[in-house]
Amino acid sequence: MPVDYFTPTEFARYERAWYARPWAYLPVVVLLVLVLAGLLAFLPIAASLKQQAAALDLTHLEKMESASVIVDRSNKIFGQIYVENRETIPYDQLPQNLVNAIIATEDNKFYQHHGYDLLGIVRAALKNAVAGHVRQGASTITQQLARNSFELKGKTFRRKLLEMFVARRIEDNFSKQKIIELYLNRIYFGGGLYGAEAAARGYFDKPAREMTLAESAALAGLVKSPNKLSPWTDREASREARNFVLNRMLELGFINEAQYRGAQAEELVTGNRQNARGQNYAIDYIRQQVIGAVGWDRAMSDGFRIHTTIDAGMQAAAEKSLHAQLDAAEQTPGYKHQTYAQYAALLQERRDKPPNEKGSAPPPPEYLQGAVIALDNRSGGILALVGGRDFEHNEFNRALQARRPPGTAMLPFVYAAAFAKGLFPGSLVEDSALDNRTVMIGGTTGILGEWGPEDANNRYEGQITARAALAKSKNGAAVRIGTNAGLEAVTQLVHAAGVESKLRPYPATFLGSSVITLAELARAYTIFPNEGSRAPAPHILDRIEDKKGHIVWQTERARQHDKVIKPEIAYEVTSCLADALSEGTGRLAYQKYGLRKFPAAGKTGSAYAFTDALFAGYDSAVTCAVWAGFDKPEKIYRGAFGSVLALPVWVDVMNASLARFTPQPFAVPPGVHKVEICSKSGLLATDKCYEDVRSEKGDVVKRRTSYFELATDEQMPSDGCDVHGDSVRTQLVKKFEEGQWPRAALAVDTSEVAPVTMQGPTLLAEDDPYEAIGSTFKPKNVAAAGAHNEPGLDPDKPIKRAIPVAPDPDKTIEVRRAQPVRPIDETAELLIQNEPPAPLDFGDDY
């Protein structure tokens, strides 16, 4: 056979295919070598990471810092204390819509994988390789749980591998249901809220199990960026994130089209951020008490259930009403101080500045403040506590810490001390001008003003009953009553009633010049509804329970109340204060502010110069005290009485208390009797106790002057009326006109005595009853006295003045000036020869 020979060109045609060439496998070999080398390098790393994952204690998954939940006396949650605001709940209290929403947006293969999703990891790895850095995580729910539970931070491949090993361990030891429960109890939802339960209560003011589909989707949507997507931060961004979650749920078949559209159309209603954070005075005080009881660490992380004495309804009413009344007060003509709105704007302006321009801490607020405290009469438990208008502005608790003068709210204790000494509500007391040197409030001269009645039309009434004097809050009468009882008796009673603050040992204490706390005042008032017994010291904690319901701390119960005054005295004061509330200084409670009809009693409290306004009152179950004023005492505005600023708040709180407490009529002690008294004499009425008055037609008719009063056997008058009847005094009244009663003859014949000539007109002391106590003289403006409520002056009658005495032309008696007592020397220079002083003018403010 002939041999065929090929040319080089022809031989190339038969060249072997590329895959048949040895060098074609070189890249594959290199790749395999690299993979093998990587694998060999990875195996010890993997073994190390696996060992590290195995060393982790999986019980830590369930050891989450839980907020201690605060509940009111009805077991209603109204606050928390925490480092992390979290309340753990079991899986069966999680809404299925929330579980599905989380799976749809965070890990749609949650039920298929075993801790990690390899395809997802590869996909993320490719994207990260293209980007040149880690930009996508592809973490499953289990991996996120591992990362948040064991602090696996940092975006590195080593951390990612460790996370995968930990996730696999979690999957091997826990069910899918348990994993989702742990995850939803642990993750951060923004706004300081950890876990689904805290987030539901914080954002929507409801437990997680009650959330709607739209609310569940909103929570799931903000997991990727909790602070940016929080509805408190950006409502529009939060809404878009919610709608994205709803769309994913629709695609995965978790919801149908109708549910999808309905949830998208739902408007999210979020709660108040401050309420969610629990920043108010009551919760802060509870936090302090819990830390004192169980220690800081346990209080912040053990998840206690803290049972308190607070009534959530009364607490809400107190906070709302105080804000509303003080806001209105700042708009009153004459108010010339910082307002709440101005201070809030100042803080917002500071927040808007760059950090380097904010400077030092903001100044403390100077706007009008207030405080409220309500007590359970029997237990001393605090039912409502408001220490100021805004805890975030200032944390000083004015209900518990501030010491301010209670003003005329102190009067019930003065009268109680007097009744214990033998006076009774029907005793007569003088309501007339009183020398201010007796009490020295606002000065040391002049006459004591009458700011207590809180009425621009107040007039002195002469002799009135103690009941009327207390109901109308007459200052001068109160000082006379207190003097009769004795300063020591009054201060001892006040201290025995629960006031621990030091009281000034001066008569000014009768009118509330000594400073005490609002809590002390409220506790002291409980002696009246408690039949003379003092309530236990105010407290706010009832008991503390752990997660299993075991009691770890409980308040000590007072076995008996300390007796302060007799039940009869307490009832007499209560009857007077009931009159004060119905027809005295507190009458606006019914006439204007809407106090509901139930047995109640109370007393306004106004301090000198309008610096403090108070009201303290009670029913058979609850005692409440309200204060308004400035942190640095100064005049609020002219006319800022307790009946204007504090009484409306008291009314709202007491009305709110009716939802939980049913007031009962005040019990009448067996030692109290009703007796008919003549109001003109304060003695037993007779059948002659009538007076002539003119009817509307102008006819003179007889009117009975008696009424039924309360008195004990010891207080009961023994004599009949000496104004009406057959007594000597009565006969004189009938026989002679006023001012014409016979007098005893003088021992000296005045016609033989030379009269003293006045050198100038006498100055007339004119008193401002509210501000310039004992310091104002206006002889040039006497006609305006009535406009200033000048006590004792009738603007319709001429004011008598001393005038020079002219010598009688029919007598030879020489009229001489008063001179120092010494022998008369006609040639000597007079020792006193001054011109009359010019009238004093203190301006129109007085």
Image (cartoon, rainbow, N blue to C red):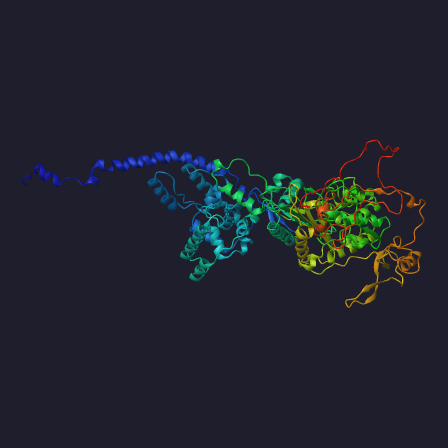
Q: Residue furthest top?
A: 828
Between 827 and 702, the one nearer to me in the picture: 827
Q: Residue furthest left?
A: 2
Marker count (numbered): 0
Residue depicted at x 77% and y 36%: 834
Which of the image's four quarters has the N terminus? top left
- Residue 624 seen in this snapshot: no
Between 657 and 9, the one nearer to me in the picture: 657
Relative image position of residue 84 (x, y in whole percent): 55, 43
Q: Is residue 320 left or right of residue 825?
A: left
Residue 579 picture quarter: bottom right
Q: Is residue 76 left or right of residue 513?
A: left
- Residue 58 seen in this snapshot: yes
On screen, residue 120 above or below 267: above
Relative image position of residue 246 (x, y in whole percent): 43, 55
Q: Is residue 151 left or right of residue 831?
A: left
Between 68 and 576, the one nearer to me in the picture: 576
On screen, residue 63 above or below 797: above
Relative image position of residue 6 (x, y in whole percent): 8, 38
Relative image position of residue 248 (x, y in whole percent): 41, 54
